[in-house]
Amino acid sequence: MGFLSERSKYAVNPLEEDDAIAEAIERKGGEIIKLNRGDPAVYFPTPKYIKEAYVEAISENKTHYTETRGVRELVAAIMGRYRRMYGLELEEEDIVVTAGVSEALYMLSSALVDRKDRVIVFKPYYTQYIPYIGLAGGSEYLLDYKENEGWSIDVDELDRHVRKLKHKARIKYILLTNPNNPTGTVLSRKTLEGIVDLANEHNLLLVSDEIYDEIVFNGARFTSIAQVARGIPHVILNGASKNFDATGFRIGFTIVPGEDNLSKELKAKLADFASVRVSANAPAQYALAEGMNNVIEHSRAIRYMVNEIEDRVNFAVRLLDENKHLSTVRPRGAYYIFPRIDLKQLHFKSDKEFVDSLLKSKYVQITRGSGFGTPGHIRIVSLPPKEILGEAITRLNEFCRRKR
């Protein structure tokens, strides 16, 4: 028997697995174009007014432990944002501030999932979903987004699987990512309404990761689960990282709006988990409160960022469409592209082999689709300026031509 715990096997992050290769190349003087990590603050500096609020919080000595649920200024700002954007009336106890959505996922699965419990997850999925379910002792039940239908969800298929699964195991929740990482899909209101009806029929909890809810483009319209799930137990995850361009702040939050018994029990237990870890980053909480409350400055910053992202994503897709070995669904949200690769024609055994070979020969770092649960694909982050994106995709296309 090994010294490490059995659950330690879940501590794996596919987004970083090729960093050692990249670092070795860089030590020898090579320059890597990195399209593997979705960090907007690298290319779009965190807005000045948010940074100034962070500095002001430090200068006012707001560097101590805070209320475990989150500072009241931020909790009030979250309440105001959801009232303003989605017509959702919240109470303070509905909200728990976390160290990013990552900690929110950890708390959620720790509060809900026991051994042999199942969580319905759609693939491709965000890489951190699966480890937290496994660490809690449960397991994922994977269903596919429909790639040939724009990475949509087939609600009838979901219903068939729920009916089959509920006779074998406890289903703790259905996890949605909207807009989606890694595909850039934005779920339609009709699809969300269908999922809500299904959850109501089967008495299931819905969890919606909406961290990209303002990064929507190409004619898409975002619908929050809060707008369609009134009266149905649900959880919303969001934070500072994407819409407010502050990934390093590590501030997220959970919202549990319901007044049913399940929701009341869950929000109380999430608050307990928050008290165990003491508090989130204090100055960053005050800074995010200003980010939400200063609507004029935020509107200006998010509008610029989304316009730039839309231009860069569409530019990258046009270049990828020139590659006959890739098949790409045009994204409508977030900033990722998730092409399918013709591995057979390119003589690769796996998407991992493809990604590693591209990095070593062309110095372009992307992520394998199998890390998101969908082999035979790659994820490309479209945040860099077009000259960098263009160079990277030109190298990718040339790599495919030579391999063929």
Image (cartoon, helix red, strand yellow):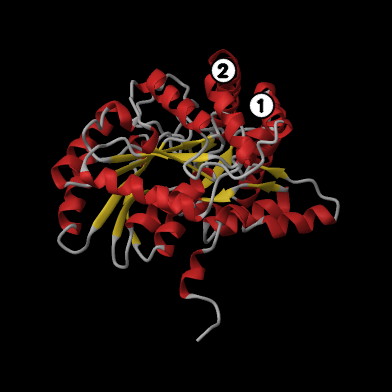
User: Mark 1 or 2 closer to N-term?
Assistant: 1
Compared to residue 382, the image places residue 310 above or below, namely above
Determine crowd level at label 1: few under 14, some 14-19, many 20+ residues with C-alpha closer than 10 A: many
Measuring 59% from the left and 45% from the top, which residue is drawn there?
65
Left or right: residue 231 versus residue 207 is left
Cα–Cα gap, marks 1 and 2: 11 Å
Q: Position of residue 42 (x, y in %)?
A: 69, 35
Q: Looking at the picture, does residue 64 appear above or below residue 272?
A: above
Q: Can you tell which quarter of the image residue 111 is in?
A: bottom left
Residue 90 rendering spot, x and y as whole percentages = 35, 29
**Helix, strand or loop for disc 2:** loop
Q: Give the amino acid type for the residue marked by disc 2 in the picture.
A: Asn
Asked if residue 77 shows in the view, the reply is: yes
Can you say whether 124 is above or below 297 in the image? below
Q: Position of residue 345 (x, y in %)?
A: 51, 52
| Residue matched to label 2 | 294
The quadrant holding residue 153 is top left
Q: Are marks 1 and 2 in contact (CB under 8 Å)?
A: no
Nearer to the camera, 63 or 330: 63
Name the residue nearer the viewer: 289 or 276.
276
* Circle 1: residue type: Ala
Residue that mark 1 sits on: 53
> Percent position (x, y) of residue 299?
55, 16
Nearer to the camera, 77 or 141: 77
Q: Secondary structure at mark 1?
A: helix
Q: Residue at x 74, y 31 (%)?
A: 59
Which residue sits at x=69%, y=41%? 395
Q: Is residue 158 left or right of residue 144?
A: left
Identify the disc placed on residue 194: none
Q: Is residue 45 visible?
A: no
> Position of 189 compared to 372: left or right?
left
Furthest-right residue in view?
29
